[in-house]
Amino acid sequence: MTADERVLILYDRRANAGAAWALRRAATARGANAHVRFLGTDRPGAGDAFAEVVEELVDVDVVVAFTSSSALTSPAAHVTVAHGGRVVTMTGADERMLTHGAIEADFTELAPTCELFAAKVTDAVEAEVQSANGTKIRMSLRGRSGVPNPPGRPRAGVFRAPYAGVVVAPVENSVDGTIVVDVSTSFGQVDSPVTILLEHGRVVAVTGGAAAQQIERMLADTDDPLSGTVGVVGFGMNPAASVCGVISQDVAMAGTGHLSLGPNRGIGGASDGHAYVELVYAQPTLFLNGAKVMRDGAIADL
């Protein structure tokens, strides 16, 4: 953020109020015109929180979102991008996370790797992801682009912090297989692995401990006809991140993969689903067009 930029800071859980107001103080000290808004949804999977302030998004240069739904997949958040602005999403971050942990990574150094890996994803038409714990999913990437975060150079767009990695919106009805979630979900760290069966891009079964029950309840409690649709597949590459039960930190960790259920139109997909949950698993092995480009979370030579 620079002097005279118009900054809108959003949060929808009271636990994130400290981070929102701390950032406002820092932005104001740098000469920015910063404002804070509480959106009030206060729960994971509540849909597109940004739709509530879509008219305001036209008139700002920077949006920073401490919201339970990720701006990355929000069509409303992309209104700012369409007007040349930047949107940074920090789902679940508290005040300490603004200065410690994953945020301390050298994002300038990580950006070229993210860009190169995203290019490989963009060039692929099919992908398969496996893990030692039992994940095995296949999907089509035809016509879809890998999205690097951070980008190699500053530009308008929607980005995650402290995320470093690559995401892609797979062809929605193409995702089949099993994902074993052994790290965390949007609700926190898992007490035991959660096994999710996917058919034609939709969740058809969820088994496991307490985390599985939370996912099942969220999917059952929504009237969203697209509930349980796979929206995003991604791979974390931030070496300074570690598992702490806060989803914006957990998805960033190098050596992990993540999959989200919910919308993906914001990154080139075709799903407008509202129910949103992220699922993180360890040590993915990724094949693109049959070639192994990642093994147990480590990227092959680019």
Image: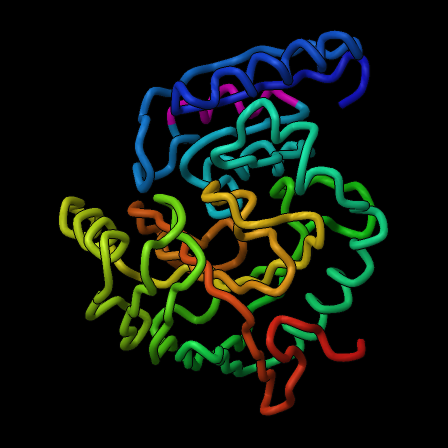
Residue at screen point 52% across, 16% down: 18
Question: Does the magenta-highlighted stretch encompass residue 216?
Answer: no
Q: Nearer the viewer, residue 250 or 120?
A: 250
Q: Quadrant of the C terminus?
A: bottom right
Residue at screen point 65% across, 77% down: 294
Q: Give left or right: position of 172 versus 256.
A: left
Q: What secondary structure prevails in the magenta region?
A: helix
Residue 201 vs 161, above or below: the answer is: below
Residue 163 vs 135, above or below: the answer is: above
**What is the magenta range?**
52-60
Q: Nearer the viewer, residue 97 or 142?
A: 97
- Splitting the image into 4 quarters, where does residue 87 fall? top right
- Splitting the image into 4 quarters, where does residue 228 fall? bottom left
Task: Please provide percent x and percent y for residue 247.
Answer: 48, 45
- Splitting the image into 4 quarters, where does residue 270 fall? bottom left
Residue at screen point 70% across, 28% down: 99
Is residue 74 something that shows in the picture?
Answer: no
Tally of numbered tags:
0
Q: How is the image coloured?
A: rainbow
Question: Does the magenta-highlighted stretch encompass residue 56?
Answer: yes
Task: Please provide percent x and percent y for residue 289.
Answer: 59, 88
Outermost residue toward the front in this view: 191
Residue at screen point 20% across, 70% down: 204
Task: Please provide percent x and percent y for residue 214.
Answer: 23, 49
Residue 151 vs 62, above or below: the answer is: below
Is residue 140 something that shows in the picture?
Answer: yes
Task: Please provide percent x and percent y for residue 11.
Answer: 46, 23
Outermost residue toward the bottom in this view: 290
Q: Quadrant of the N terminus?
A: top right
Q: Nearer the viewer, residue 149 or 301?
A: 301
